[in-house]
Amino acid sequence: MPPEPIRFNDGAAYEKFMGTWSRLAGDAFLRWLDPAPGWRWVDVGCGNGAFTEMLVERCAPSAVQGIDPSAEQIAFARARLPDGAARFDVGDAMALPYGDDAFDAAVMALVIFFVPDPAKSVAEMARVVAPGGSVSAYSWDILGGGFPYAALQEEMARLASLPLWPPSVEAAQIETSRQLWADAGLTGIETREIVVERTYSDFDSYWRIAQTGPRLAASITAMASADRQTLSDRLRARLAADAQGRITLSARANAIKGRVPA
């Protein structure tokens, strides 16, 4: 039996933890994707609407539909875009509630490794996109150390805390993605790496934000206080600050795009 999907149910917490990173990677991704204006988009696994908002603001779409399994995230997304610029549904990436050829583009932003059966989700994206349309995604290269909070997870592992990897972590690897896209019948497949940087004002700022991660928070809270202090001390020593005390971290995502055969 496939594992249950991981759901993030706190849009505000996710915004602090991942929203900035998502927009940094999303900006580079959209520049690479270079979509035409007037497309009908579906943002699969839209979460709290951070990337959906970028589609509305950057891509001159004719319509944008977001879908996510978390009702709480969808509520946050609707509040984020209250003017009707996008529509939102609660639903499953592996069984999209839309008809064939309903969109010109389907996209997954930092999502595919959370889907229990990535192949089903890619096939569903291909099904709902019209011939000639775009199917694309970008995901943190977790296995390659590209996750924005990789240092935190590595130090937690040193303290015998199991890695908090999503259920389909391998789906973010470029070769695995290529195979998923090819198996879904998509053509013109291209991939690229996206590297982004984020600067925190100081270590304390980074540490506060890192602990708000929807999955990390529970694990850190469950640690003994001495282990939490050790974790903080190790991270402080590892993450070099500049002369002003700022900490700049990099992250790497793998991106892929293809087209539904005309």
Image (cartoon, rainbow, N blue to C red):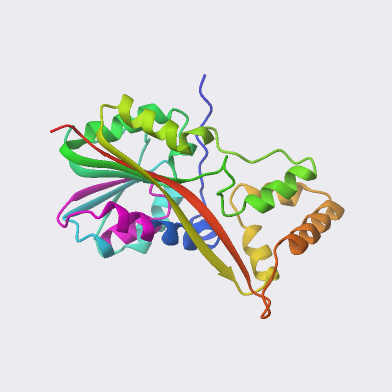
Question: Residue at the right extreme?
Answer: 226
Q: Nearer the viewer, residue 193 or 208?
A: 193
Q: Quadrant of residue 143?
A: top right
Compared to residue 125, the image places residue 25 above or below, namely below
Specify whether 58 is left or right of 173.
Answer: left
x, y (%) of residue 42?
Answer: 27, 46
Residue 76 visible within the image? yes
Q: How many marks?
A: 0
**Picture quarter containing residue 89?**
top left
Give x and y (percent) for residue 156. 74, 47
Q: Residue furthest top?
A: 1
Place of residue 97 in the rendered image (x, y in percent of width and height, measured from the top left) = 27, 35
The residue at the point 27 percent across, 65 percent down is 57
Asked if residue 172 is positioned above or below residue 54 in the image, the reply reads above
**Residue 73 drawn above or below residue 200:** above
Q: Residue at x 50, y 52 (%)?
A: 252
Q: Is 102 on the left-hand or right-hand side of 147?
A: left
Q: From the viewer's perspective, is 231 left or right of 86?
A: right
In magenta stretch: residue 47: yes
- Asked whether 255 falls inside the magenta stretch, the response is no
Q: Residue furthest bottom?
A: 244
Q: Position of residue 135 (x, y in %)?
A: 28, 40
Q: In the image shown, does 208 or 172 lie closer to the viewer?
A: 172
| Magenta residue span | 27-56
Quarter the C terminus occupies? top left
Instruction: Tell me, yes or no, if residue 94 can be seen here.
Output: no
Which residue is depicted at the point 68% across and 52% down?
Answer: 152
Residue at 23 percent of width and 31 percent of height:
127
